[in-house]
Image: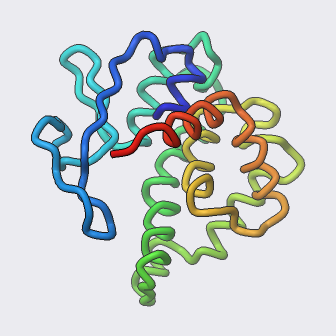
Amino acid sequence: MLALLKELGALEEVNIEIVTIQRLDGSGAPDPRNPHPDGKVPLLMDGDVQVWESAAIIQYLADRFPATGLNIPPDHPQRGAYLSWFAWYSGVLEPLLVLEFAGLQHPVLMNTFRTKAEALTRLRKALEGQDFLFGKHFTAADLLLHSPYAWMGKPGDPVIDAWIDRCMTRPGATFAMEFDAQVQV
């Protein structure tokens, strides 16, 4: 979310709260100050509006700051494709990456979520011959979809790897990496 806030020019408009969470290695613990319904991060509070899950927060904020051009507006012909990338991330890519990380494989899982190879093929086809998912236009969808590779490593596909590199040179990505390096939770 830090990368998005930087890209939106909204860092001064938010209060970032650092909270502890239970980590995969068993370290950490739920933080009683964390208002997330599941005790996780991220969570956005916008007045009385509570938004959780990365895909929802990114869509919400990109739409909230349309002048930045990170969203594709509701009346734009590419809006459906834009929204579909958010759903694809949450419903396909992230589950695949988590299953792979956990070392879990089963035909039901692969038929439901596809295989990693199928997901990478889908992403590669979308990126072939262009800089970002929507041509030369970096959007919040690029920000979300490249994010797992920013911390897990690139998949080794030249087209996807070059896209990740382009996303990682954005001011938001640079800011988020520097911020994370300074914060110890």
Residue at far bottom of view:
106
Can you give x and y, in whole percent of width and height, for residue 145 in the image?
59, 49
- Looking at the rendering, which quadrant does residue 107 occupy? bottom left
Q: Is residue 79 at all visible to an observer of this figure?
A: no
Can you give x and y, in whole percent of width and height, for residue 41 in the image?
31, 44
Q: Residue at x 41, y 79 (%)?
A: 102
Q: Is residue 32 left or right of residue 58?
A: left
Q: Residue at x 51, y 34 (%)?
A: 179
Q: Is residue 3 left or right of residue 13?
A: right
Q: Is residue 3 at all visible to an observer of this figure?
A: yes
Q: Residue at x 85, y 43 (%)?
A: 130
How many numbered callouts? 0
Q: Work out whether residue 37 or residue 118 is closer to the camera in this orientation and state it.
A: 37
Figure coloring: rainbow
- Looking at the rendering, which quadrant does residue 22 occupy? bottom left
Q: Is residue 13 left or right of residue 131?
A: left
Can you give x and y, in whole percent of width and height, for residue 50 in the image?
23, 28
Can you give x and y, in whole percent of width and height, for residue 14 in the image?
37, 16
Q: Is residue 143 left or right of residue 17?
A: right
Q: Residue at x 66, y 76 (%)?
A: 117
Residue at far right of view:
129
Q: Work out whether residue 161 or residue 177 is closer to the camera in this orientation and state it.
A: 177
Quadrant assignment for the C terminus: top left
